Image (cartoon, helix red, strand yellow):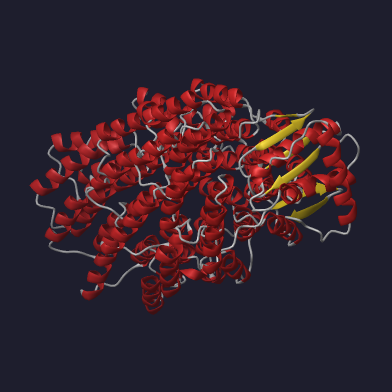
Amino acid sequence: MSERNEASWNTIISGCVGVGLYAEAFELFRKMLVQNIEPNIFVLSSLISACNKSASMVSQGIQIHGFVAKIGLLSDVFVSTALLHFYGTYGFMSNARRFFEEMPERNVVSWTSLMVGYSNNGDPEEAMKIYSRMRREGISCNQNSFATVISSCGSLEDELLGRQVLAHVVVSGLESNVSVANSLISMFGSFGDVENAKCVFYRMGERDIISWNSIISAYSQNGICEESLRIFQKMRRANVKPNSTTLSSLVSACSSVDNLKWGTGIHGLVVKLGLDSIVCICNTLVTLYSESGRFENSELLFLEMPERDLISWNSMLASYVQNGQCREALELLAELLRMSKIRSHVTFASAMAACSSPETLLEGKTVHALIIRAGFHENLLMGNSLITMYGKCGVMGAAERAFHTMAARDGVTWNALIGGFVENEEPREAMKAFKSMRENGLSANYITLVNILGSCSAPNDLLTYGMPIHASIVHTGFERDDYVKNSLLTMYAKCGDLASSNFIFAGFANKNAVSWNAMIAANAHHGSGEEALKLFVEMHRSGLGFDHFSFSGGLAASSNLAILEEGQQLHNLIIKLGFDSDLHVTNAAMDMYGKCGEMVDVLKILPEPSNRSRLSWNILISGFSRHGFFKEALETFHEMLQVGIKPDHVTFVSLLSACNHGGLIDEGLAYFSSMTSEFGVTPGIEHCVCIIDLLGRSGRLGEAEKFITEMPIPPNDLVWRSLLSACRNHNNLELGKKAAERLLELDPSDDAAYVLLSNVCAINGRWDDVETVRKKMKSNNIRKKPACSWVKVKNKVTSFGMGDRSHAQTEQIYMKLKDLMKMIKQAGYVPDTSFALHDTDEEQKEHNLWNHSEKIALAFGLINSVEGSTIRVFKNLRVCGDCHSVYKHVSEAVRRDIVLRDPYRFHHFSRGKCSCGDYW
């Protein structure tokens, strides 16, 4: 054009903006000003809207604001509204609000722009305040206003407010507007009200792609994922072409429904439509494959992405963490840092989730330092994640420091702290934190209650904490929550009240897998293994599938019963269903084989050292110890250290137990000393009991007594019972009486205290004292726990008590006992009548000894088992010395291997010898 006027300049600049030629538009604007031609309000509004398209144009937007102010056009509502929208787009809400308040004139678009700014910048509450003010000032909303307000209600999850806004929409006559209806669908979806979302969708006279996306997302986010897939099929039949948002929602739906077949099909559709390079879809596919167990696909997809955003990196970080690839997650974080990519608090939250074991504590501290350097240390999510991380690493001191340095705390913060204390077996501290939480005005949610109920695990806890918390749960209505009910069930079982556990379980209207698993575990923990296995079968009959918790509970029941055949059958089912690759299940199977006396099978299924968890190592050390392989137990401990696994308090219980039963006194004392100095593990009462038992077994009773007086924690009943047992073994009447007095002070109803004291007196020939002890037991209505032994023959478990004559084969059993006695006496057996604790003649004492339950069970096993097979006998109390001697002689006389398990260890008898070396 030879000559341009104001109209031609305005037209060409607006045209450039309209087709996305923003740089050219601003260059023309500069030339226009050089020629002293003043732009009109439409061009200025157009240029300001162009600045919303790219963050690189923020400076131009601010310059135009200055120009508009200079030429006096800020009073124009169109220009000022465009500027208001510009500031909101880039999150400059304080500037936007100040500019809004200074506007001489506002229209509905101005009000809506401010609401949109607040809503898009994560402040829906402020958006609703603007809406309320708008109504007070008599400004009528348009469809955009309502769409923004409805979206804010959904973000706030305020259903009451949402329904009030819906009433305003109906009054305004805009409920049929497409954008308003789309927002209503999304809002109802966020409330979990899919029925109303569906009603709005099907009443729409006209729908666009956003309508379809909104209803698909509503079903997907509420777990009704099959329906979201059906809606997608309808969408395809309606010839509506899906976009990236549609496909992202569908992939998420497939993740929730665990339908990999659908997910891979949608992946194929993504490729077919040429959308496989869109970052948001790739991100969702990375998550889908990870959650479906196809980790290799997830990783490959991430590596092949032509472009990645921060969500891509965060998704892959989360994928590594979810699949237990914590080292790889930390390497990915390091790569992200090297590339100087923008990081968010979500990135660091995933990185901290990767540092969730004591072995990754150093890396966790490094991530903590990076958080401080990045300036995220005051972020609430970061504080909560730090508490969780340090709790999982077993460093509650650091977790508490992180808690106390937080400027603000929410319910998640308190839950993380309480959960950390529970996980690290500090129930008193968990209770203190729970009390402080309530004193600070925060209400418990179901997570709080599940955590705090988990800290109640002893009979004394039930009255002090458990029942009052249960009463509070009923008062607040949380007893209807399945997670809370399952936790109550487990708490009562751990505290010894299985009847209450059964009552809660019976009250479930619809028992799910979690309920069944909790009840199976409760019975297994409480020693009701047969009932646990019966529940396992009933669960299967109910049509529910098993998971790793079900199998772990079933295996634990088999372990407690020490029934190898059931355990083997269960393990075969595990292999058949593919659960043998699950480390939790493998650990449970190892524990089962170890407790059933089959260390060979433990070693067969033992994972490679690099794939073992700390629990795997603990089970292995405990198994070796229980079976008398003390050298192997110690070697396993050192191998554990070599592969970088840090021992915990359970490790040291097993290790000290191995030294105890193996007579390795110096080694045991050295390990106890190293617990705190080398490994930072504070000795608990169970470790102290091991040392007392270690010293007591070896006859060093003076040292054992001195150790008790110098213990870092007050001695409990286990301590004094261990000393009393040592006094019985070494005939120390004076110290035995002292130990019994202390034990009865702590628990006057302890039957073991009376029995052991009576035994000490009997061994020393103090029969008057024996009678005094027995009279005291009778007057206090205290009964000795009856001995019981059982043996499994021909798939049936048969139990026997002391002098049991109730079995149909009683005559044969006692004839067999008579034959065995004669046979082994000829081979040199001499009855040890010191274990016959009644003041009778030697012949009667010998008769009493041969009425012991383990001898009866042995005779029954020999009569009914196949010649040459191994006899397996189990006893609920410690085997007596005379029975141990009989088992050795019988194994030689009948040329049979015999395995005897008592609560302390396994005894493998073969050819006249025992695996314990007569030291137990």
Residue 713, image quadrant:
top left
Q: Tell me if 701 is positioned left or right of 867 in this view.
A: left
Residue 298, image quadrant:
top right
| Quarter of the figure with the C terminus | top right
Q: Tell me if 805 is positioned left or right of 779 in this view.
A: right
Front residue of this view, candidates 620 and 384: 620
Asked whether the viewer can see residue 682, the reply is no
Q: Tell me if 417 is positioned left or right of 737 in this view.
A: left
Asked whether the viewer can see residue 27, the reply is yes
Front residue of this view, candidates 606 and 27: 606
The percent coordinates of residue 616 (x first, y second) are: 58, 34
| Quarter of the figure with the N terminus | top left
Residue furthest bottom in the image: 171
Q: Tell me if 263 is positioned left or right of 673 in this view.
A: right
Front residue of this view, candidates 398 and 509: 398
In the image, residue 102 above or below residue 423: below
In the image, residue 381 above or below residue 807: above
Residue 603, image quadrant:
top right
Residue plotted at (72% across, 41% down): 883
The percent coordinates of residue 819 (x first, y second) are: 88, 42
Front residue of this view, candidates 877 and 246: 877
The percent coordinates of residue 76 (x first, y second) are: 16, 57
The percent coordinates of residue 188 (x first, y second) are: 47, 66
Residue plotted at (61% across, 61% down): 515
Number of numbered callouts drawn: 0
